[in-house]
Image (cartoon, helix red, strand yellow):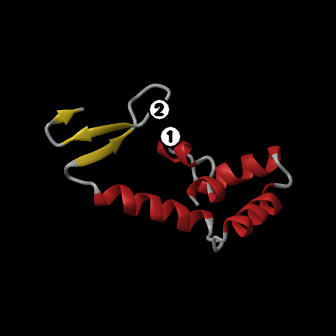
Amino acid sequence: MLIVVLPLWRDLAKGFAISELGEELRADRLDFDTERGRLLHALGLAPVSEEEAAARLLTVAARTAPDYIPRVPDGDHLPYELLFSGGPA
């Protein structure tokens, strides 16, 4: 669901606001909301807001702490790395 509702989710780690990402996406893809609705329907998923999708992502990521902590290294912010409590994997 995350990729359908919030396809630019990785940019959240760069400090971009959800509203800013949504504006950029919709400027490039005028039919984004329509296509997203069709895809959610085809997958049998209930629509959620972009904010709700981001909150769910953060909740799931927080469940792994302190043993596993998703981290974005400096630079281009990709790829995400998974750190173990004993140091980098």
Which residue lies at the image location 65% right of the left edge and 56% below the top edge? 4
- Residue 85 drawn at (x, y percent): 16, 43
Q: Are marks 1 and 2 in contact (CB under 8 Å)?
A: yes
Q: Check disc 1 and report the residue beneath it.
A: 14
- Position of the C terminus by quadrant: top left
Amino acid type of disc 1?
Answer: Lys
| Callout 1: SS | helix
Hey, which residue is sitting farthest bottom in the picture?
Answer: 46
88 sits left or right of 24 in the view: left
Q: Residue at x 47, y 32 (%)?
A: 77
Up/down of 22 relative to 34, above or below: above
Left/right of residue 34 with respect to residue 67 in the rendered view: right
Taking the view exactly as shown, the residue that stands out farthest to the top is 75
Q: Where 11 falls versus 43 (above or below)?
A: above
**Local crowd at mark 1 within 10 Å, few (<14), some, or many (≥20)?**
some
Disc 2 residue crowd, few under 14, some 14–19, many 20+, Cα 10 Å: some
* Residue assigned mark 2: 77
Q: Indicate the position of residue 79 as horizontal and vertical percent values.
A: 45, 32
From the image, which quarter does the N terminus lie in? Answer: bottom right
Query: Between disc 1 and disc 2, whose residue precedes?
Result: 1
